[in-house]
Image (tube, rainbow, N blue to C red):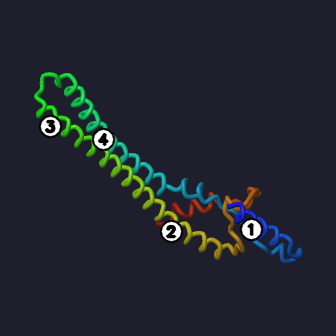
Amino acid sequence: MNLRMFASAMMVVGMFSVGHAAAAELKVVFVDVKSAIENTKQYRDGLQHLESIKNSKQKELETLRDKINQMDKDLLNQSMAMSPDRLSKKQQTINDMKKDFQRKLQDAQEAMTMERNRLLQGINTKFGKKIRELGKEKGYDYILTKPSVLYVKETHDITAEVTKLLDVSK
């Protein structure tokens, strides 16, 4: 990572060390990719959708967990009065429910991860296309990203413009 940042910094230094006439024509701008994407309507709507999925799964899992906990308490209170065979069956039922709970928890986590990745993949694809279009339209020589730049004058930051482009396009 440091090597990549060093190489990017050297590239920027090299770009600005060319002759004055060539440097005057060089058009370099900056975009904060994370901020540009996270401020789009599509991303915010996607997060709301993810939150609703999370809340739904969470309620389902809490209900199952509460049922398991209640069965554990009941088993503990009644275990002395149960036959060994019935006690064993109840314990097996509870263990099966605990395994089911773990599977559902893992499935919910995987579903959330997949949904988030799907959301980001769609936005990232659109982002790349819009950046190339903007670069050609405005005649930029370079569009740099946040991790590769240590300082950027605000007039060269096109993050808000990119966010607007992403919101306008479908």
Q: Nearer the viewer, residue 9 or 89?
A: 89
Front of the two marks 1 and 3: 3
Front of the two marks 1 and 2: 1
Label 4: state its secondary structure. helix
Indicate the amino acid at tag 4: Leu
Give the labeled residue for mark 2: 125
Left or right of 107? Residue 95 is left
Indicate the amino acid at tag 2: Thr
| Residue 23, quarter of the rendered image | bottom right
Mark nearer the N terminus (2 vs 4): 4
Label 1: state its secondary structure. helix
Whole-percent x, y for residue 91 in the image: 20, 35
Residue drawn at 51 percent across, 68 percent down: 126
Mark nearer the N terminus (4 vs 3): 4
Give the labeled residue for mark 3: 89
Residue drawn at 40 percent across, 57 percent down: 115
Give the crowd class for mark 4: few <14, some 14-19, many >=20 residues within 10 Å: some
Residue drawn at 74 percent across, 68 percent down: 7
Compared with residue 136, is residue 121 higher up or lower down, i.e. above or below?
A: above
Label 2: state its secondary structure. helix
Give the labeled residue for mark 1: 7
Indicate the amino acid at tag 1: Ala
Mark nearer the N terminus (1 vs 3): 1
Q: Nearer the viewer, residue 6 or 49?
A: 6
Residue that sits furthest to the front in the current view: 84
Front of the two marks 2 and 3: 3
Cα distance between the residues tagged 2 and 4: 34 Å
Give the labeled residue for mark 4: 61
Residue drawn at 37 percent across, 46 percent down: 54
